[in-house]
Amino acid sequence: MPVPDAKHFDALAKSFRKAGRSLRQDGWQNAFTGLGGSRDKSANTKWRFSGKFLQPEELDLLYAENDLCQTIVGAIVDDALREGIELRPAEDSEEGEEGETLDPESDTDDAKEAQAELDAWGVTELVREARIWGRLYGRAGLLLVVKNGGLAEEPLKDDAGELIDIIVVDRRELQPRTYYQDPTEAKFGQPETYMLTVTSAPGTQATGVVVHESRFVLFGGTLTPKRIKIVNDMADLSVLQSVYDVLKKTESNWDAVCSALTDMSQGVIKIKGLIEAIAAGKTDALAARFELMDAMKSMLRTLPLDAEDEEFEYVERGSLSGVEGLIDKSFQRVATAAKMPVTRLLRVSPGGLNATGASDIQLWYDEVRAEQRIVLKPAIQKLVDRICGPGWEVCFPDLEKQNPLEEAQIHVAQATADNTYVTMGALTPSEIAKCRFGKGHWAPGYDNVDMAPHEAALDREHEELVNPPEPPAIDPALGADPSNPEASDDGTDSQEKPPEA
């Protein structure tokens, strides 16, 4: 099956537009104003398909030379990995063999060792770099070099040897070679092997080797339709693809405003007979005259003029009122295309009365958490399983940081809730202390509560409700309840009553 090119894709898009025009004929129409008719200015408006995708060479220059492009590509990755990563025992590994509970202190020591091993490999920085190149180029990854891992073109087994190296590769070093052909497989149609071409040093010959996809931790760009990926060498489009036109217009507007600022006040020199002097070929004398005037103005802050034939004045070009709002709207349009708030794109504080930007930051943090959960966590988990072994779960620290006052308010509210639970007997002070400071620092929640004693107490209460204890038996010889020695044989109270008055 031939691979469709850009012309084929353009023809397909034209056919879709033609079919849409033939099927959709409803809408508002006004014969007097031309709305919805042939005189409507928007009647022939349609989306223009450029047929051009940003190539790696262009993306290199955009990322290297434009600060907004760097922010658009890397901001979400930087914020997602800003606080690093943490490891904790996986949920299915909290119980030992035959229901034996693992020692929390031992788990903490093991977690510190695993965390130190990840830091020694520099996993956070490696993932950050690979993910940024994936968003920029549409495809990048980490190559796992394993000792005694078999042939490179074969799948990497879980029980392969130890990891000896992790290499960052981008799209130009990673070209698809073969694809999964079995329709019953989950990865049908996706690349099975890649031709890895890496240049070790400038001026050296690049060497290529076929590597199976299981030996990579791959990252892509923006979500891309399948047919466009086929045209684009099975790579995603860059996150800058949809931002490029908007960013180009915004940068042009910004440059135009900067140029207008330099010409806000223009000096004008009126010289009698200037046109005749130019026509007579006296341009050298005029140039020398203007150069002398400029030098005198710079050194002595004076401008010598002929009293009769020359005149100097400043001409104001007017104000730029209203331009600031248009520029702000332009950057808001860029932020919309980049799916991030303006405050994060431009690194500025929100403006306006009582403006805090809390809603924008909250929406941005939601995007960052989605990036952590959907993209980064599965990739890092694969590295953790290879480096530290199974049984560990990747976690990300909280993104939001409270100031001391907010943190103190949270502590007070948590202490009130803790006191309520202790008063009602749901928890003990020791359990509260373990929850708050069992990890070596203050922590919310009740994760460290040992529920075994509580569950045993619940079981005892349930057993007493289902099978209540029998009342003690009465000894016939005594004729009284042995548990109540104050009762007499006739069932009356043997205690002497006070005499009646």
Image (cartoon, helix red, strand yellow):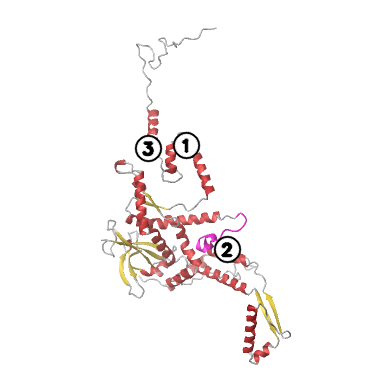
Q: Amino acid at mark 1?
A: Tyr
Mark 1–mark 3 distance (CA, rounded to whole Å): 17 Å
What residue sits right under mark 3 in the picture? 452
**Residue 307: mark in rendering:** none
What residue sits right under mark 1 in the picture? 421
Q: Which residues are magenta?
A: 336-354
Q: Position of residue 191 (x, y in %)?
A: 34, 65
Give the mark, 2 or 1, whose residue is nearer the N terminus: 2
Q: Is 352 inside the magenta-drawn segment?
A: yes
Residue at the image point whose x is 31% and y is 72% from the top = 207
Q: Is residue 311 left or right of residue 216?
A: right
Tag 2 secondary structure? loop
Query: Which quadrant of the figure contains the N terminus?
Result: bottom left
Tag 1 secondary structure? helix
Q: Is 11 inside the magenta-drawn segment?
A: no
Residue at the image point whose x is 44% and y is 39% from the top = 432
Q: Is residue 400 left or right of residue 208?
A: right
Mark 2–mark 3 distance (CA, rounded to whole Å): 67 Å
Quarter of the view holding residue 237: bottom left
Please tell me whether residue 83 is drawn above or below residue 59 in the rendered image.
above
Q: Are discs 2 and 3 less than 8 Å apart at CB?
A: no
- Answer whether residue 354 is visible to the viewer in this image: yes
Q: Are discs 2 and 1 less than 8 Å apart at CB?
A: no
